[in-house]
Image (cartoon, grey):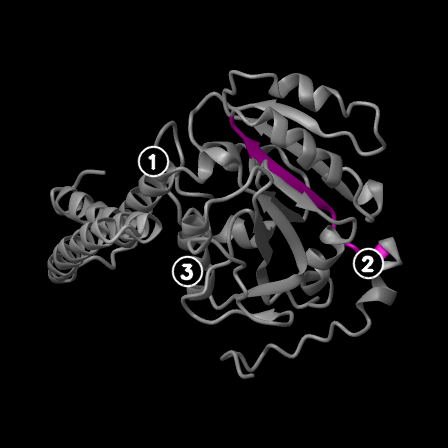
Amino acid sequence: TDYGSARAAIDLSNFRFRISNSAVLPTVSIIIPTFRRARWLRETLATVVAQDYPADRFEILVIDNNSPDETRSVVAEFATVKKAPHYLLETRQGANFARNRGVNESTGEILVFGDDDILVRPDWLRELVAPFVADPAGRVASVGGEVVPVFPEGCPDWVRGFHGPQALRPDAGPTREGQVPMSANLAFRREALAGVGLFDTSVTREGGKQFSSDENVLTRKLRAAGREIWFAPAAVVQHQMPAGRTTFAYVRRHAFDSARSRVIDRVSEGRGSTGYLLSRFAGNLGKALGFTLAAGLNAVAGRGGEARKALVRAWRSCGYLYQIPRSLAGRI
C-alpha cells in the first residue's frame, strides 16, 4: 500500500541482528507522567522495568504531577530492580507540563512517552525504536506504537464502541497526513523535538478537564518540516481502562473536552478562520439537536445503551458549540 512517502523504504529486515549489538542502539528515555493512579502505575512499572533492551542504554523517568496518593512510594518499590525508575515531582498541574519536565530532565537520544496505565511486553522498546535504528539518515522523527484498550474491571457494551486499537497500518511504516499516533505510546528523536518545541501546555489534561490531542501540534510541525511520522504495530501496549473511565459521566466529559481541544488546537496553529469556525458551529448545532432527538427516541424504545451513545455524540457537538465562541473571542 502506498502511504504517500517515496522515502519510506527503510529496511527493517535485519533489525533483529542489529539490535543484538548495543553499539548500534540509541539511548532511550522512557517518560511516564502520572496523576493519582498509583495502583495502575505499579502495574505499568512492573512491565516497563523488564524491557529486553541493554540496561545501560535506557532510563525510566516517572513524573508525578501532584498526586495525592502513594505514587512516590510506588516508584520507591522498584528501587532495587536492575533498571530502577527515577522519581520527579512536577508541581505545575497538567499532563503536558509533566511531559515537558520529563524532556528537560532526560538524557536519551530517543524520548518515549507512555501513560501510567499501560502494560507492555519485554520487546516493546525494541519494536518502538526499530524504525529509528534502521534510519541512520534521521528522516523518521517520531514513531507511534499500537494502543489496545483493555477493561480489567469490565465495560458496558455501549462504551466499547468508543474504544478500539488505532490500527493506522498493518506493518511498520509512515503514517498518512491526518493520522496521529496516540501519546500513550509515542517516541520522538530528541533533535526533532528541539527543532519544533515541546508539548503545548495550553491544551492538556488538568483536573476535571479531559483535553486530548496533545500530540497533534507536534506531529503537524514535524510533517511541515519534512520529517516522517511512523507507526509500528508490533510495539503494542495494552491501555488499561478502569471502571471510572466507563461511566456515562466520564465518557460524556471526555467527548466534550476532546471537541474543545480540537478547536483550540486548530486556532493555535492559525488554521481556524472565522468562516471555518462559524461553519463548524452551524454544523454541530444541527448534530447536537439530531443526536439529542435520537437519544430521546432510543430511550422511549427501551434502548438505553443506544440512547447513551447518542447523548455522548450530542455532548461532543456541544463541546464545539461551547469552544468556538470562546476561541472567536480570543479565550481558551
Magenta-tinted stretch: 23-35
Residue 277 x, y percent position in the rendering: 16, 57
Residue sitting at 69 percent across and 67 percent down? Answer: 135
Residue 162 x, y percent position in the rendering: 42, 53
Question: Label for residue 249?
Answer: 1
Residue sitting at 39 percent across and 42 percent down? Answer: 200
Q: Answer yes or no: is residue 317 visible.
A: no
Residue 146, relative to residue 256: is it above or below?
below
Question: Label for residue 220?
Answer: 3
Q: Quadrant of the C terminus?
A: top left
Q: CA distance from mark 1 to mark 2?
A: 48 Å
Element type where label 1 sits in the image? helix
Q: The disc labelled 3 sits on which kind of residue?
A: Arg
Q: The disc labelled 2 sits on which kind of residue?
A: Val
Q: Earlier in the sequence, mark 2 or mark 3?
A: 2
Q: Depth check: 270 or 14 in front?
A: 14
Q: CA distance from mark 1 to mark 3?
A: 31 Å
Q: Earlier in the sequence, mark 1 or mark 2?
A: 2
Q: Which residue is mark 2?
A: 24
Q: Left or right: where does residue 232 sit relative to residue 248? A: right
Q: Answer yes or no: is residue 150 visible.
A: yes
Q: The disc labelled 1 sits on which kind of residue?
A: Ala
Residue 242, relative to residue 124: is it above or below?
above
Q: Depth check: 79 or 287 in front?
A: 287
Element type where label 2 sits in the image? helix
Q: CA distance from mark 2 to mark 3?
A: 29 Å
